[in-house]
Image (cartoon, grey):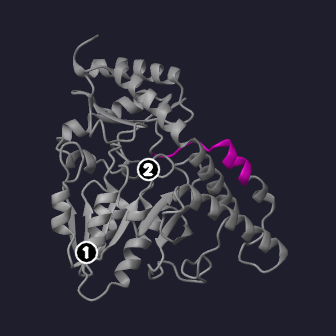
């Protein structure tokens, strides 16, 4: 199997697996007071330090804050938005976000619209970039929260979170960054943010664990009630095994960030050239994470292409929306028609992808697509 779906999830790093294995047998509850519990708690705290060190690359200039583990990025994003809404100051009813955000953000803010939230969803241009003037006009004294992702999960486009964060700060609003696809790959502009959501399984860690970073002074209402085990505000028993895996993956991502970026840049150029001019890139080709190549070809049926190439793992967009049957909301937002959106595929690659795999995949995808387009090579 050639795996080209790194935006959906990444392979487990050997270092993460090694860190997790001892906790299959050392089963103590990290919230228990006895020795086994204290050992488990120590493992959780060691992992927290490693994840925080990877997130806050420049500790000397970064704002103070705390990192709280969650069951994943979806929980972290829901908690950030709903928790801030529950404690909103009087007159702060506006939430500003972007049309290409993950459904964990878009669906959450839409649910709050039924509770009186004034939701502003900013458009993007045909490259997937938001207009700073649109953001500046929307983020005002009525704004509670601005939410934007660092790296788009479908087309890889990078937003200027530092600029949007400055706008939020000027309006005395909170800035939430969905850094799930960016953390461990590009520097996260922590100084511009008040809340940051991240996930382990996007950085070669285990599934089922994420985290929410909160700037010092930011207080959220709990999303989960029960015991307040995590920081006194998030209830539920933490898994030392998942925390340890997250910590190890984060440490490796921090160490290998430059090498990983150079590797995927080489693969991106190689794959782009191999596919040729019949495939058109969706999204900005410059301001993007190069581990993501989202392309379309007229006449291609992406669903048929994916099902026909069973030994190559790639997708037509977000794994979270793969069963909906609807064309990607991200591709629609950048101006693609339904037909163009359904002719698009997302190819994701990373640390463990080889050049030979890229060459084989490009050849196979091109050969499978040609009969759909009505002509042969």
Extreme front residue here?
60
**Other-residue count near label 1 (Cα within 10 Å), few / some / many at <14 / 14–19 / ≥20:** some
Q: Callout 2: 10 Å neighbours few (<14), some, many (20+)?
A: many
Residue 121 highlighted magenta (yes or no): no
Q: Position of residue 163 (x, y in %)?
A: 29, 59
- Asked whether, in this view, residue 178 is left or right of residue 99, the answer is right
The residue positioned 76% from the left and 59% from the top of the image is 23
**Nearer the viewer's eye, disc 2 or disc 1?**
1
Total marks in image: 2
Going from N to C along the chain, the mark reached first, 2 or 1, is 1
Alpha carbon separation for disc pair 2 and 1? 27 Å
Task: Report the residue that reaches farthest toward the bottom.
Answer: 90
Q: Quadrant of residue 367?
A: top left
Please, is residue 65 above or below residue 93 in the view? above
Who is closer to the viewer here, 234 or 264?
264
Q: Position of residue 236 (x, y in %)?
A: 60, 75
Q: Residue at x 74, y 68 (%)?
A: 42
- State left or right for residue 96 relative to residue 185: left
Nearer the observer, 359 or 51: 51
Tell me if I can see residue 368 in this picture: no
> Measuring 71% from the left and 54% from the top, which residue is drawn there?
20
Task: Tell me where residue 179 appears, x and y as whole percent.
Answer: 43, 56
Label of residue 171 in the image: 1
Which mark is on residue 181?
2
**Where residue 102 sits: x, y (%)?**
35, 56
Residue 344 to residue 197: above or below: above
Magenta span covers which residues?
A: 8-20
Helix, strand or loop at disc 2?
A: loop
């Amino acid at each position: 199997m050639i795996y080209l779906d790194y935006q959906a999830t990444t392979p487990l790093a050997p270092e993460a697996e090694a860190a997790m294995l001892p906790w299959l047998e050392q089963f103590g509850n990290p919230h228990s007071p006895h020795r086994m519990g204290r050992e488990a708690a120590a493992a959780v705290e060691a992992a927290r330090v490693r994840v925080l060190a990877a997130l806050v690359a420049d500790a000397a200039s970064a704002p103070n804050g705390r990192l709280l583990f969650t069951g994943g990025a979806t929980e972290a994003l829901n908690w950030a938005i709903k928790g801030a809404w529950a404690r909103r100051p009087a007159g702060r009813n506006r939430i500003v976000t972007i049309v290409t955000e993950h459904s964990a953000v878009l669906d959450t803010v839409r649910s709050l619209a039924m509770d009186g939230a004034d939701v502003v969803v900013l458009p993007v241009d045909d490259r997937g970039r938001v207009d700073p003037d649109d953001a500046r006009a929307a983020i005002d004294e009525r704004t509670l929260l601005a939410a934007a992702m660092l790296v788009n999960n479908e087309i890889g486009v990078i937003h200027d979170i530092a600029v949007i964060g400055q706008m939020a700060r000027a309006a005395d609003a909170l800035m939430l960054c969905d850094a799930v696809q960016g953390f461990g790959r590009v520097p996260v502009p922590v100084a511009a943010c008040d809340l940051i959501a991240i996930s382990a399984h996007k950085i070669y860690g285990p599934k089922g664990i994420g985290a929410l970073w909160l700037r010092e002074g930011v207080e959220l209402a709990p999303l989960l009630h029960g015991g307040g085990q995590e920081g006194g505000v998030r209830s539920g028993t933490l898994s030392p095994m998942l925390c340890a895996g997250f910590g190890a993956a984060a440490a490796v991502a921090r160490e290998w960030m430059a090498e990983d970026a150079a590797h995927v840049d080489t693969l991106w150029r190689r794959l782009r050239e191999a596919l040729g001019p019949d495939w058109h890139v969706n999204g900005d080709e410059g301001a993007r994470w190069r581990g993501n190549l989202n392309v379309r070809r007229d006449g291609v049926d992406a669903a048929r292409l994916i099902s026909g190439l069973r030994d190559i793992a790639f997708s037509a967009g977000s794994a979270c929306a793969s069963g909906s049957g609807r064309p990607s909301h991200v591709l629609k937002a950048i101006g693609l028609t339904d037909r163009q959106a359904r002719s698009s595929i997302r190819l994701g690659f990373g640390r463990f992808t080889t050049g030979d795999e890229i060459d084989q995949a490009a050849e196979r995808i091109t050969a499978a697509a040609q009969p759909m387009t009505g002509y042969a090579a």
